[in-house]
Image (cartoon, helix red, strand yellow):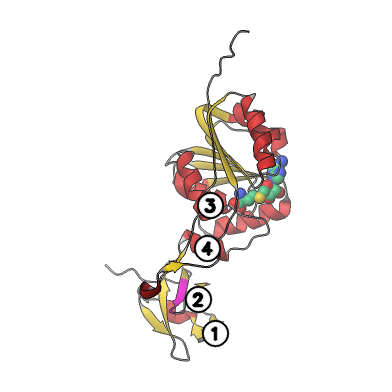
Amino acid sequence: MRDVVEYGHRVLLAFEDGSHFIVSAGEDSFGTHKGVIDLSKLIGAEYGSALETAKGEVFFVMRPRFVDDLFKMKRRTQIVYPKDMAFIIFMMDVKEGDLVIDAGVGSAAMCGALARSVGNMGRVFAYERRKDFYDIAKSNLEKWGLLDRVELKLKDISEGFDEKVNAIFLDVPDPWNYISNCSKALLGSGNLAIVCPTTNQVQKVIEAIESENFIMVEIWESLFRKYKPVSERLRPFDRMVAHTAYMIFARKAEKRRKEI
Ligand code: SAH
């Protein structure tokens, strides 16, 4: 079987110097530092194959990964980083068929990751209070082919959530104000995940969680170090992303108060 580019496919063009671009296969041409590429020549090319620019420079025709999209996408908000995203999805146990709330949607990076995980049978209810971010989120999800799994809502979560769900992901500046709403919207044993950049916020979140029906509380951060892929000088890059966000997890359960 041959896996070939069709008209309208989004394609990752990768050069050997590490630079890469995401384009849409069609009539246009696309200028790069290594010469112009006629995008109609991509149609019918096999994924993984090598083609040449007008200057004779080689590039590879690749399928974009979701992470490639994330680093190239249109965004006006901070996004959840893939290193955190993957861990959060496993800790929230999001899987095929699940119902999940994502708030606030922002640029929809996490929303897209959740939509991929719930599959065709699942659903993401995505809350955003700003119309400009709602519009960016919608166009990103549409581009990734994930909009049909997402119910986008232009709504402030202080008004509460409209659904009962298996998991909630909260990424807003004041998450402690919505813990009670999260508790109401989660099904028994459901999973809550919250990200916040500062320890001050974490402290407030933990206080709020302690006064609600949650157990199995965990706080994490993840540090990833990237290495230079050069066999004879194998070592990390000089710089690393030292901080993204703290991740807080908790599960909803009936909490019996001790009689005093
Ligand atoms: N997780 C997103 C980024 C979220 S940025 C991503 O990965 O792309 C935080 C978003 O929450 C912003 O878009 C902001 O407008 C929205 N927001 C903040 N408070 C809110 C509230 N009370 N109700 C709904 N959305 C809210």
Looking at numbered disc 4 in the image, what kind of residue is underneath it? Asp
Q: CA gap, disc 3 to disc 2?
A: 24 Å
Image: 138 above or below 157: below
Q: Are marks 1 and 4 in contact (CB under 8 Å)?
A: no
Q: CA gap, disc 2 to disc 4?
A: 14 Å
Looking at numbered disc 3 in the image, what kind of residue is underneath it? Gly
Residue 155 in sight in this render: no
Looking at numbered disc 1 in the image, what kind of residue is underneath it? His
Residue 30 in sight in this render: yes
Q: CA gap, disc 3 to disc 4?
A: 10 Å
Q: Are marks 3 and 4 in contact (CB under 8 Å)?
A: yes
- Is most of the magenta stretch helix, strand or loop? strand
- Secondary structure under the numbered disc 2 in the rendered image: loop
Looking at numbered disc 2 in the image, what kind of residue is underneath it? Ser
Q: Are marks 2 and 1 in contact (CB under 8 Å)?
A: yes
In the image, 19 versus 66, the foreground residue is: 19
Q: Earlier in the sequence, mark 1 or mark 4?
A: 1
To which residue does mark 2 refer? Answer: 19
- Secondary structure under the numbered disc 4 in the rendered image: helix
